[in-house]
Image (cartoon, grey):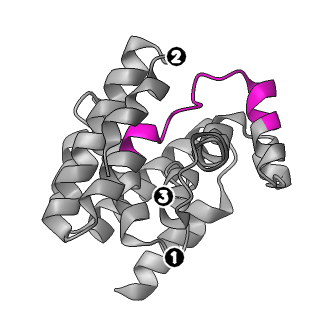
Amino acid sequence: MNTDKYLQYLDSLSDYRRVHSLNVSAEAVRFAEKYGGDVEKARLAGLLHDVTKETDFDRQLQIIENGGIILTELEKRSPKLWHAISGACFVRDVIGVDDPDIFNAIRYHTTARAGMSQLEKIIFLADFTSAERDYPDIDVIREHAEHSLEDGMLYGIKFTISRLVGRGDLVSPDALAAYNDILLSK
């Protein structure tokens, strides 16, 4: 799979978002190599995971609707989650990458979910730990990710849920399901 032809879809992104997308792609490749994942799928999903992140909300909602996705009430009230859903639809429906695993890796890179594939876990963690990230506990999350995808995810999900609750924001049931799923599998 030649991912170079997909670089054009980053042209409309800000410099920061373009660098972030390239960093996530590189980190996804590293995780795929480390944990035996599909390197090319990881490269592509990482590259395109935020393709609609800077698209205006009305356009994102149109992409989601055209993609046949019906938002839950929580998703309707959480516009920060829309880019993952609209991005997955855009990659499938506009770019033409019709791979369910890539779709789901992009779709759930923000919230996670129960029963994630290896690629989904890789993209979730690569987004969390990409080179330009510098939020509190980034070194701890990176350290956990080096032990296993699940350890990194568990710490990342706990970190995210804690921040959301601390700000009084809604918490996706997908994030809670992912957290519980990882704990139940240990």
Label 2 near label 1: C-beta < 8 Å? no
Label 3 near label 1: C-beta < 8 Å? no
Tag 1's secondary structure?
helix
Sequence-earlier tag: 1 or 3: 3
Tag 2's secondary structure?
loop
Residue tagged 2: 12
Of residues 28 and 142, the one nearer the viewer is 28
Image vertical order of residue 74 relative to residue 122, above or below: above
**Callout in the foreground (1, 2):** 2
Return the mark for residue 156: none
**Callout in the foreground (1, 3):** 3
Q: Position of residue 48 (x, y in %)?
A: 45, 39
Name the amino acid, label 2: Ser
The reply to whether residue 121 is in sight is: yes
Residue at position x 43%, y 72% in the image: 117
* Magenta-highlighted residues: 46-62
Residue at position x 52%, y 51% in the image: 106
Residue at position x 32%, y 23% in the image: 19
Q: Position of residue 29 (x, y in %)?
A: 22, 51
Residue tagged 3: 102
Q: Position of residue 185 (x, y in %)?
A: 40, 86
Return the mark for residue 180: 1
The reply to whether residue 168 is in sight is: no
Q: Is residue 175 left or right of residue 40?
A: right
Residue at position x 38%, y 17% in the image: 16
Label 1: few (<14), some (14–19) or many (≥20) C-alpha neighbours in 10 Å: some
Asked which quadrant contains residue 69, the reply is bottom right
Name the amino acid, label 1: Asn
- From mark 1 to mark 3, how far is it between C-alphas? 23 Å
Asked which quadrant contains residue 68, the reply is bottom right
